[in-house]
Amino acid sequence: MEVPLVNFENMDDVGINLGDPSDSGYPTSPPSEAPDHNLLTHRLSSPHQSPHRGRRRHQSGQEGLSPSSPPSSLTTKAKSSSGSLISNVKLLINSESPTDSVFSKMAKDCYENEDVFEKHCIEEKDEKVVINISGLMFETQLSTLNNFPETLLGDPTKRIRYFDPMKNEYFFDRNRPSFDGVLYFYQSGGRIRRPANVPLDVFANEMVFYELGHEAMEQFREDEGFIKEPEVLLPTNELKRQFWLLFEYPESSSAAKSVALVSVFVIVISIVIFCLETLPEFREDTDFPPILTQLINGTQGGSAPHPATKDVFAYLTDPFFIVETICIIWFCFEVGVRFVVCPSKRDFFNNIMNTIDIVSIIPYFVTLGTELATTPDDDMNSSQNMSLAILRIIRLVRVFRIFKLSRHSKGLQILGQTLKASMRELGLLIFFLFIGVILFSSAIYFAEVDEPQTQFVSIPDGFWWAVVTMTTVGYGDMCPITIGGKMVGTLCAIAGVLTIALPVPVIVSNFNYFYHRETEQEEKQVMDAAAEAAQKTSAANKYGSTPSLNKSNGNWQNEKNGAHC
């Protein structure tokens, strides 16, 4: 049995209406368009009826239609409503057709539960939506867009502004290739993928226009290789927030910039003092090694007398000690205030800069305790020599104070971020150098082993030569003599150039990225400040305030902004 197909979507084009006049619950067409009821029965029961006949425009006079009946237009949207479709299905089910088709059985099952039919067949969520992007047509389901109601296409109140009722479509004069990624965002449940032929800035602007949200933008930035901006934590207490911004963010206010200048000045003074006190005319005898002290004192054996040591009063009145004490007082005050007002004590100790600040302060107190505990009458012994060596190492830690400048220097911050992002490349560089050092130091040893005047008496002695050669430094303190050794040195230099040249472009690329990002942030801050100033000026002109009122209001506004930083 052949199943005839009837296209109900274009049934209105035939110029008939299948509505039941007795059923007042469904809309019906005008009486002039209602045909003979047997016409539909004849169409459904005819086994030779072509399934494409339902899509044709029927002219007047064909198959018993009255010539006076005007044909319906294919573009008429008002007649193809869900109500007329239900009426037509009702009439089809109630009609006595000699052929019980599969379609009629399905229609009867749907009609038995009219709510199920309406829910699955004609609900709004199953409707198709046509989206016109600068002439390129896209078609999707309305339920796909409704999954993200916060976006432009998912919110009916937002997208209705772009609806064209004449063409029954949404029109957007936007970038056409970018909409492939936007539509994929709705279809994939929130995943964002940029088309390969769309630039980054263009696709980012399209994401902002379609209001895909902050999470989608963060996912896009992460997928494209952008480093996620760290979240800035601020104390909840207003007073603590003021001090935290004052000492941690120099660009937050003029007072913070002044504090930063004072901190930089103290750091520079501390480093200068650290360098000057090592000059021979300022250096104490305790800075000499014990053997050199014995030679100076003319002793050749036995227990060497303790070198001339300043007493406690002379040490405490030393100009270098006084300046160092002033610097330490400022450092302790700065670290203490930041620790008290910081929003998270755990993050405070995890910050490498805070660790450097604490470590650079410790040598002062260790040195002070050692000087106070040592008396001029004590003899120099092995334990004191060990203590002096440890003290020198601890005092060397003071040089780390120079890294405190990175808190106030954008260049040092960029360098630190570059090294952090290039740890993998730096690890590969060190690994390659390690392999080259082992390989060429072994080769140079066996190439020079038969030479009596060789300087490569062992493989470890060749480590220094291999490192200097591979890094293209070439001190010349060690050099091969034989022809084989010179050939090994040539290969070592070539291998070193290639080894260093491979990861360097990646490191340079990371540096350029961080540098341009910092430059863009500075330009954005300048533009935001200019826009805010222009907005304040326009607001003042709008309300017609006098210059005196502008001045007072400006001062009040600055104080208010400073209180809420």
Image (cartoon, grey):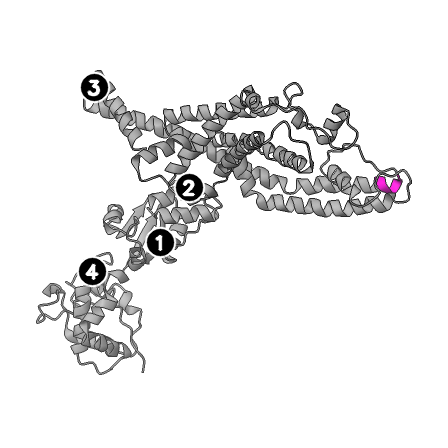
Asked if the stretch drawn in magenta spans residue 403, the answer is no
Which residue is disc 4 drawn over? 72
- Asked if the residues shown at circle 3 and circle 4 are in contact, with their CB atoms under 8 angstroms apart, the answer is no
Q: In whole angstroms, how far apart are the C-alphas of marks 3 and 1?
A: 56 Å
Q: CA distance from mark 1 to mark 2?
A: 20 Å
Q: Residue at x 83, y 41 (%)?
A: 456
Q: Earlier in the sequence, mark 3 or mark 1?
A: 1
- 2 or 3: mark nearer the eye: 3
Asked if residue 483 is among those painted magenta in the image, a careful observer would answer yes
Q: Is residue 437 depicted above or below 99 in this figure?
A: above
Q: Amino acid at mark 4?
A: Ser
What segment carries the magenta color? 482-486
Question: In front: 277, or 543?
Answer: 277
Q: Earlier in the sequence, mark 1 or mark 2?
A: 1
Residue 116 vertical position relative to residue 293 in the rendered view, above or below: below
Report the amino acid beneath label 1. Answer: Phe
Is residue 320 placed above or below 128 in the rendered structure?
above
Q: CA distance from mark 4 to mark 2?
A: 45 Å
Amino acid under label 3?
Leu
Please give the name of the residue rendered at 71% of the width and 31% of the height, measured from the top-left corner.
290
Q: Quadrant of residue 130?
A: bottom left
Horizontally, residue 522 falls left or right of residue 84, namely right
Q: How far apart in space, not on screen, are marks 2 and 3 (Cα)?
A: 44 Å
Looking at the picture, how far across and down is residue 205, in whole percent? 38, 41
Q: Which residue is mark 3?
A: 549
